[in-house]
Amino acid sequence: MRSRRRYLAVRLHTKEKLPSESTFRNAVWQQLQELYGELGVSRIGFWLIAYRQESHAAILRCQHDQVEPLRAALAAMTNCNSTPLLLHVVGISGTIRKAVSLLPQLDARDVIKPRKHR
């Protein structure tokens, strides 16, 4: 059976330039590890689905029963690579399409294509 997932539409608020996609992803991952450890991070199933610096928007994926731990980690983040940052969850969805529609500044082309594992 396929695992159920939830997609969090997130607005990023900062007065400075946002960090790159990989820097943001690593900062969220680091925050999750600090709060929940490796086992907790694996249960959450965090994945960055879409990220756009210009529009200050991102879509994050997690397991359907791990939304609250991910939201707690996002609320605890105060900076990203020494850039002051505030994350605001606009909405939660069961599909990527709906999550993209929650952030009008995002486009379907902003969705990051997953890499194939070898």
Image (cartoon, rainbow, N blue to C red):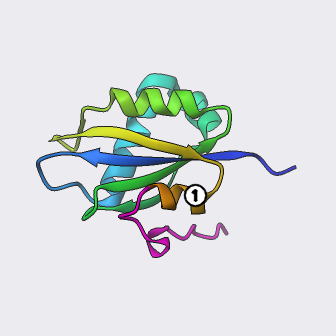
From what the image shows, is residue 44 above or below residue 17?
A: above
Which residue has dot 1 on it?
A: 98
Q: Quadrant of residue 32?
A: top left
- Quadrant of image for the C terminus: bottom right
Mark 1 residue type: Lys
Of residues 31 and 52, which is closer to you in this image? Answer: 52
Give the residue displayed 39% in from the left and 34% down from the top: 74
Q: Residue 104: image x %, image y %? A: 40, 62
- Local crowd at mark 1 within 10 Å, few (<14), some, or many (≥20)? some
Q: Position of residue 24 (x, y in %)?
A: 33, 50
Tag 1 secondary structure? helix
Residue at coordinates 77% horizontally, 47% vertically from top-left?
A: 3
Residue closest to the far top:
35
Residue 33 seen by the camera: no
Q: Which residues are magenta?
A: 103-118
Q: Position of residue 84 (x, y in %)?
A: 17, 39
Asked if residue 111 is among those painted magenta in the image, a careful observer would answer yes
In the image, 112 versus 82, the foreground residue is 112
